[in-house]
Image (cartoon, rainbow, N blue to C red):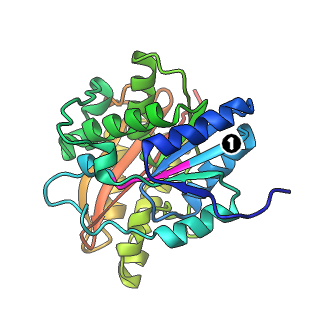
């Protein structure tokens, strides 16, 4: 059994590459988990997946400024490096890459990744420029680490789809793995932003999961009309008096285009603000036909 040591901490691309070269010299497969820190069990499930498949595990902690829009929570996004490193030590991570902003976006940086149709609906509409920032940062990190496989969570379903599209279109050699959502005992999807919620708001936030559960139950009972299902989901969410819905959408699980009828794997996706904290969640609906 591997020792639970604090992972080696590096902050520059030059030092990172030295460590990667050494790992490659030992013919070790490299797994990579990019994060923005404030780690929780959802992140750790990705780390464990990387460790199960690979010989050497790298986790990055970088709060990416380019994916935050005006008025969003970049400045207050939780930064808990010491606690994060303790959690990574418990998982046996080999290396933590914690670059400063100027290490990732050097002076004069002026190259951006624009992903097409996958980045346009849902969060693409609600957060203009968000996926440009995500895709650019992820591509840069993949180029820095050069892993065999990189691990992402299904909670950020559209993000994972965007990254898969980017990896395929740009012929990246890294395998993109997407792992299941990890939930709290009451069903709330784990998220770093959950810590913003007061205890009362945290209880109200359960309506997101309840609405997804209802969608699944309706499909199991034979309902196939997407508009009907979405309306019922909204009713559940609006039980929370301060809920502000960005979207409740039933879309094709590959194209993210709206569907009228549940006739194949369909993504039920939602983004809701509870007490001014924006939460997202999703599930895949499958009809029996």
- Identify which residue, 248 or 181, lies in the foreground: 181
Residue 181 in the image: x percent, y percent? 55, 51
Question: Which residue, given by chain and number where applicable, does mark 1 sit on?
Answer: 56
Q: Give the range drawn in magenta.
A: 59-63
Residue 140, located in which quarter of the rendered image? top left
**Residue name at image x 45 percent, y 65 percent:** 38
**Residue name at image x 37 percent, y 69 percent:** 78
- Identify which residue, 235 or 271, lies in the foreground: 271
Quadrant placement of the N terminus: bottom right
In the rendered image, is residue 196 in sight? yes
- Identify which residue, 184 or 249, lies in the foreground: 184
166 w.r.t. 281: above or below: above
Instruction: Sort mark 1 into few (<14), some (14-19) or many (20+) by Cα contacts within 10 Å.
Output: many
Residue 161, located in which quarter of the rendered image? top left
Residue 185 in the image: x percent, y percent? 60, 69
Residue 158 in the image: x percent, y percent? 38, 38
In the rendered image, is residue 153 in sight? no
216 drawn magenta: no
Question: Dominant secondary structure of the magenta stretch?
Answer: strand
158 w.r.t. 232: above or below: above
Residue located farthest toward the right when viewing the structure as drawn = 1
- Identify which residue, 232 or 75, lies in the foreground: 75
**Residue name at image x 41 percent, y 43 percent:** 268
116 w.r.t. 151: above or below: above
Quadrant placement of the C terminus: top right
Residue 264 in the image: x percent, y percent? 50, 27
Residue located farthest toward the left when viewing the structure as drawn = 70
62 drawn magenta: yes
Mark 1: secondary structure: strand
Answer left or right for 94 relative to 77. right
């Amino acid at each position: 059994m591997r020792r639970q040591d604090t992972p080696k901490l590096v902050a520059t691309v030059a030092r990172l590459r030295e460590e990667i070269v050494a790992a490659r010299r030992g013919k070790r497969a490299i797994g990579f988990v990019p994060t923005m820190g404030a780690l929780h069990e959802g992140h750790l499930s990705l780390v464990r997946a990387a460790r199960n498949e690979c010989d050497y595990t790298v986790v990055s902690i970088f709060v990416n400024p380019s994916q935050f829009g005006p008025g969003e929570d970049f400045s207050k996004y939780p930064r808990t490096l010491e606690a994060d490193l303790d959690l990574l030590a418990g998982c046996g991570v080999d290396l933590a890459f914690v670059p400063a902003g100027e290490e990732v976006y050097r002076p004069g940086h002026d190259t951006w990744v624009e992903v097409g149709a996958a980045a346009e609906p849902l969060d693409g509409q609600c957060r203009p420029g968000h996926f440009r920032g995500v895709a650019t940062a992820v591509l840069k990190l993949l180029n820095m680490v050069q892993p065999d496989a990189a691990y992402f969570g299904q909670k950020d379903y559209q993000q994972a789809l965007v990254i898969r599209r980017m990896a395929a279109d740009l012929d990246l050699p890294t395998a993109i793995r997407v792992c299941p959502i990890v939930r709290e005992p009451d069903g709330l999807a784990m998220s770093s932003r959950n810590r913003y919620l007061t205890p009362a708001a945290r209880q109200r936030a359960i309506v997101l999961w309840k609405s997804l559960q209802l969608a699944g139950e309706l499909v199991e009972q034979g309902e196939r009309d997407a508009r009907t299902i979405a309306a019922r989901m909204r009713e559940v969410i609006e039980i929370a008096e301060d809920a502000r819905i960005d979207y409740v959408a039933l879309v094709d699980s590959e194209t993210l285009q709206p569907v009228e009828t549940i006739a194949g794997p369909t993504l039920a996706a939602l983004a809701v603000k509870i007490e001014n904290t924006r939460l997202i969640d999703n599930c895949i609906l499958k009809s029996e036909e």
